[in-house]
């Protein structure tokens, strides 16, 4: 239960040629972690449709909380299968894609981006990068690819393969080296959710250029670099209908049970985040299992103690939000 996270593994350095791109895409399809260039910064890429693959990103970065991630796609047509574009979103996509713009839009009913990559939100962040290597990888992967900047949490974003190696060697499967990135700052993030587009993070596309396209000033949503959505708002999305009781030994009096690690007993209305005590597996299951237990209609969900190390810190952060008084 105390295995170090993430497990150490050899990190392959891949050239950004036909065979390197094919290998990167194959690794991604198999659930692996690959640092790939985009024109903004190197992204730590994983299959966005796989909660387990996405959990690997948080483990490798040692990210303390489950921020929602950007899903990368090769073109507007594939992005429109994941999200609902209003007139502003469409105009911005047509003006700036491929390029350093991320659009946060309502997820479509057919959205395949995992709950974990979306941090349980009803919206999805989509980006079509302009870098030719990123484009080729995305085409070959054939699915949305989640990618935050390829640096360890709290460090500066990686704009070269050497930065990535310094932070992540031994934690990821491969690095696709295409030299230094062009833009060097992350994409501009604009939310088109309910009419007036909001600037969530300034970035590679200047605000003025965006305002020119939408014909109105952007609503600024505070300094959104790392937490564009207030924890309170996020918490309300996680909050199940049931009460949540943390650090429980066992369910009492009709409670649903969210377990973790090997258990001597079976309980009714119960799910186990990871019977083997693997925090990465637990992270991948967290949002989905909370939802499933909530649907069972019990008054309270009792949750086993989750270790506080590695991804446990993020899991506990979300659980505490779910348990917070409302
Ligand atoms: O340039 C970039 O954007 C790079 C490259 C690799 O594409 N990626 C990047 O990702 O900077 P990351 O994970 O560091 O930043 C993602 C930002 C976070 O601030 C996150 O909170 C926000 O996007 N975000 C993602 N989904 C969101 C959503 N549904 N609603 C609001 N904000 C969201
Ligand atoms: Mg970052």
Image (cartoon, rainbow, N blue to C red):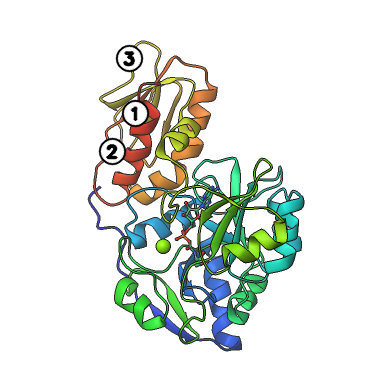
- Circles 2 and 1, Cβ within 8 Å, touching? The answer is yes
The image shows residue 262 at horizontal and vertical percentages of 30, 38
Task: Judge the density around disc 2: few (<14), some (14-19), many (≥20) Cα neighbours within 10 Å.
Answer: many
State the separation of the CA atoms marked 3 and 1.
11 Å
Q: Tell me the element at label 3.
A: loop
Q: Residue furthest top?
A: 253
Q: Tell me the element at label 2.
A: loop
- Location of the C terminus by quadrant is top left
Residue appearing at x 73%, y 51% in the figure:
85
Q: Any atom of ligand 1 within 8 Å of the CB at mark 3?
A: no
Q: Closer to the camera: disc 2 or disc 3? A: 2
Q: Which residue is mark 3?
A: 252
- Could you say which is closer to the camera, residue 54 or residue 220? 220
Q: Is residue 247 above or below residue 231?
A: above
Q: Is residue 217 above or below residue 270?
A: below
The image shows residue 34 at horizontal and vertical percentages of 47, 71
């Amino acid at each position: 239960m105390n295995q170090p996270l993430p497990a150490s593994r050899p990190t392959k350095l891949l050239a950004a040629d036909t065979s390197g791109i094919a290998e990167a895409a194959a690794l991604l399809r198999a659930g692996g972690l690959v640092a790939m260039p985009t024109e903004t910064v190197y992204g730590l890429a994983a299959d966005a449709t796989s909660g387990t693959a996405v959990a690997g990103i948080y483990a490798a970065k040692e990210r303390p909380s489950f921020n929602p991630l950007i899903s990368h796609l090769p073109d507007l047509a594939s992005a429109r299968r994941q999200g609902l574009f209003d007139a502003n979103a469409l105009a911005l996509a047509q003006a700036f894609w491929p390029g350093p713009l991320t659009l946060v839009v309502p997820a479509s009913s057919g959205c395949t981006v995992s709950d974990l990559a979306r941090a349980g939100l009803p919206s999805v962040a989509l980006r079509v990068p302009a870098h030719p290597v990123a484009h080729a990888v995305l085409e070959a992967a054939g699915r949305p690819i989640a990618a935050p900047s390829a640096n360890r949490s709290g460090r500066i974003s990686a704009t070269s393969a050497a930065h990535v190696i310094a932070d992540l060697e031994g934690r990821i499967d491969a690095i696709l080296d295409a030299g230094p990135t062009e833009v060097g700052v992350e994409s501009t993030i604009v939310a088109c959710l309910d009419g007036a587009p909001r600037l969530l993070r300034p970035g590679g596309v200047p605000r003025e250029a965006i305002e020119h396209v939408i014909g109105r000033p952007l609503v600024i949503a505070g300094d959104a670099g790392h937490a564009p959505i207030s924890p309170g708002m996020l918490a309300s999305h996680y909050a199940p209908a049931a009460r949540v009781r943390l650090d429980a030994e066992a369910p009492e009096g009709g409670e649903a049970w969210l377990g973790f690690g090997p258990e001597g007993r079976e309980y009714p209305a119960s799910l186990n985040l990871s019977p083997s005590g693997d925090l990465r597996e637990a992270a991948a299951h967290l949002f989905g299992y909370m939802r499933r237990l909530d649907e069972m209609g019990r008054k309270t969900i009792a949750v086993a103690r989750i270790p506080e190390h590695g991804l446990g810190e993020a899991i506990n952060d979300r659980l505490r939000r779910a348990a917070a008084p409302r």
